[in-house]
Amino acid sequence: MSGGISLAPYLADVERISPLRWVGQVTQVIGLLIESSGPSVAIGDFCEVLSASGRPIRTQVIGFREGRVLSMPLEETDGLQLGDAVVARSEDARVEVGPGLLGRVIDGFGKPMDGGPAIEAQHAYPLYGTPQNPLERRHITESLVTGIRAIDGLLPCGLGQRIGIFGGSGVGKSTLLGCMSRQNSADVTVIAMVGERNREVRAFLEQELGPEGRKRSVVVVATSERPAPLRVRACFVALSVAEYFRDQGANVLLVMDSVTRLAMAQREIGLAAGEPPSQKGYTPSVFQLLPKVLERAGNFPRGSITGFFTVLVEGDDFNEPISDAVRAILDGHIILSRQLAAQGHYPAIDILHSVSRLTSQIAASPQQKAVRKLREALSAYRDAEDLIQLGAYVAGSNPALDASIQLRPELLDFLRQDQNSLCKLDETLGRMQKLAAQLETVPARALRTK
């Protein structure tokens, strides 16, 4: 119409809208897998089962089989029956974010768990993000201070670096994470607790993180009894929250505990969808998921996300499939030793088996020199430890080893640290350089043996 508003585009939109709502039906339930005859959905979409009990059950589509829709629940399935209606939900995979998240504990849907008021959202961020152009990433040149001497001194971590913390059960992973989360130099800390025991969540919040750490942290929780899709979703909620604060110009510390339980959750989903199992039952989708999660941390033009990802090593086998896959992606790894933990040495970091791949980019020359000297001393002592314990080592036969033996108490004192103590970077570097100088200058002395 001349001089008026054309209705053609709007009429075309109306024609595309279907007045019918496709409703599917539950045809089979095996374990946590729900099979239904519809609706029309895509993999990753969300559905709702309208159970006879009147309580809707949210599900996520994970695949298709012989014209049927395969989905897994995001919440408890009590009251689910054959023939229940299944409808597609219009929501997309997003999480509501805003500054009001600071100091809060949320679940895998982004909803508060701490009994506080509703969180005022300013944006809705996509859960699964978009792949970053690798050429847009900035070089990592600035260090993140964790307050842990063994890390800041010998295994320096940069803003935007990704580090794995590997260890078996009971070696102090959660305690170490709590210390770092409470006293690091980042602007915001985002903590994802995935597959943890219920008891551990409150203990971590109150004893490890504490009121100080919670003020500038966002904690995302999906405990072990929650359905597998919700545990996976919680990880992506944490990543999206971290990306929101990064886009506001913040340096974010992302702590994920643990990647192993994320992999186990994805294994449940993969096996239910009919994927072929490989080593230890892990499915191909597990190894496809890991880089999608780990690569979202990094140093970007607006801000950075520094990632610490724990890996629960099954049977203390550091070459099991998940450990191998994660170690190949990350920029460094910290190994926690059960032997050191048994000796009361905390944090139980095995310096000689741990590495930060960006030390040369982050640490100044004096620190790099001190790192080499201290590692040499620790290595020399470990190589000769059996001889020393047996009293078979003859003092004076190796001056470098003599110095390592004489300064052993000082070295161990430097590496040990109380969980409530914070060590500033200047103090850490000063003690390191003093130890390195002593190792070079201390005269060889006779080792007294019984």
Image (cartoon, rainbow, N blue to C red):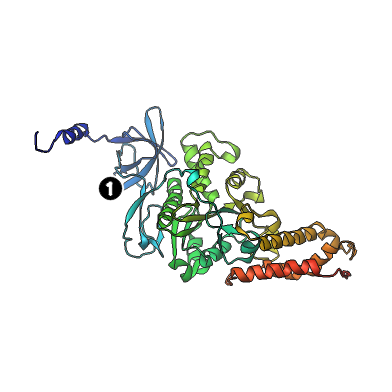
Quarter of the image where one finds residue 37: top left
Which residue sits at x=61%, y=52%?
A: 332
Label 1 Cα neighbours within 10 Å, binned few <14 / some 14-19 / many ≥20: few
Which residue sits at x=9%, y=34%?
A: 2
Quarter of the image where one finds residue 51: top left
Please tell me which residue lies in front, 144 or 362. 362
| Depicted 417 relative to depicted 330: above or below | below
Q: Secondary structure at mark 1?
A: loop
Please tell me which residue lies in front, 353 or 244. 244
**Which residue lies under the disc numbered 1?**
54
Lateral position of residue 24 relative to residue 233, left or right: left
The amino acid beneath tag 1 is Gly
Q: Quarter of the image for the C terminus: give it.
A: bottom right
Q: Is residue 301 visible?
A: yes
Could you say where residue 94 lies in the image, as x and y percent from the top left? 36, 48
| Depicted 73 relative to depicted 381: above or below | above
Could you say where residue 93 lies in the image, as x and y percent from the top left? 36, 45
Lateral position of residue 2 relative to residue 205, left or right: left
Which residue sits at x=88%, y=62%?
A: 393
Could you say where residue 134 lies in the image, as x and y percent from the top left? 50, 44
Could you say where residue 98 lies in the image, as x and y percent from the top left? 35, 58
